[in-house]
Image: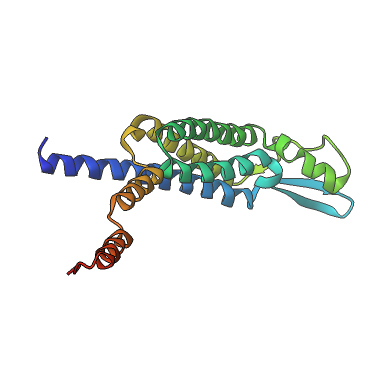
């Protein structure tokens, strides 16, 4: 293989690793951001007139936020770990991404059910929410897209991660080079031994 082909292969490997790590981090970040926003609005009629109860992502799909934290940590590990840990982490990211998607899909399919607990806490009445009146915001769809990005990052790690080098390998190589380097203390000891024998070390 020519030098140009080798350089191209290394560049392609770095690009795939960068895409996986940044994609995983971006997907996790989108889910975390979406979790702080309103996912469902539920109009409720009361004695004081109609009010609107809001359910954030944290209330509607709390598991998605916890999974996003796992995904963010996994994306970092994906770009720094050795081959065995990398494969396990990549598979975990695929699973985590799929679970995030599933959590978002549940809210999209049944927004009334997602806001039911929040509605009961606010109005002390359970089971009054209706899927016909509950209004979705764009944030559940964005969280779903974030889950897809996390799963895709894991997929890239599984398919392309065999040739990625981890930080551990680089540190071991640096440590090995340092251990093989000659020490100045040995040369100094030899000079003192020569002087003790009456010889000129120079």
Residue at 10 percent across and 39 percent down: it is 2
Q: How is the image coloured?
A: rainbow
Give whichever of 128, 142 is nearer the camera.
142
Tell me residue 125's x, y (percent): 87, 40
Tell me residue 16's x, y (percent): 32, 41
Label count reads: 0
**143 displayed left or right of 121:** left
Residue at 66 percent across and 43 percent down: it is 135
Q: Residue 105 sits in which quadrant?
A: top right
Tell me residue 89's x, y (percent): 48, 35
Residue at 53 percent across and 30 percent down: it is 95
Give whichever of 160, 128 is nearer the camera.
160
Considering the image in quadrants, where does the N terminus appear?
A: top left
Considering the image in quadrants, where does the C terminus appear?
A: bottom left
**38 displayed left or right of 151:** right
**70 displayed left or right of 110:** left
**18 displayed left or right of 36:** left
Give whichever of 125, 169 is nearer the camera.
169
Residue at 83 percent across and 48 percent down: it is 122
In the orientation shown, which residue stands out farthest toward the left?
Answer: 2
Q: Residue 108 sits in which quadrant?
A: top right
Q: Is residue 165 visible?
A: yes
Q: Is residue 61 visible?
A: no
Tell me residue 12's x, y (percent): 25, 41
Above or below for 51 versus 17: below
């Amino acid at each position: 293989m020519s030098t140009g082909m080798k350089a191209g292969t290394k560049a392609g490997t770095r690009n795939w690793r960068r895409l996986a790590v940044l994609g995983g981090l971006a997907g996790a970040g989108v889910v975390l951001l979406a979790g702080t926003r309103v996912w469902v609005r539920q109009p409720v009629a009361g004695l004081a007139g109609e009010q609107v109860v809001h359910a954030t992502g944290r209330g509607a799909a709390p598991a998605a936020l916890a999974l996003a934290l796992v995904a963010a940590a996994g994306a970092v590990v994906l770009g720094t770990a050795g081959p065995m840990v990398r494969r396990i982490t990549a598979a975990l990211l695929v699973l985590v991404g799929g679970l995030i998607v599933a959590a978002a899909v549940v809210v999209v399919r049944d927004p009334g059910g997602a806001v039911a607990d929040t509605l009961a806490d606010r109005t002390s009445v359970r089971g009054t929410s209706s899927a016909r009146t509950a209004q979705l915001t764009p944030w559940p769809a964005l969280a779903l897209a974030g889950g897809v990005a996390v799963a895709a990052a894991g997929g890239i790690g599984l398919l392309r991660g065999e040739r990625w080098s981890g930080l551990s390998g680089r540190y071991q190589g640096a440590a090995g080079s340092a251990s093989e380097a000659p020490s100045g203390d040995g040369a100094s000891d030899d000079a003192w031994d020569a002087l003790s024998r009456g010889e000129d070390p120079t």
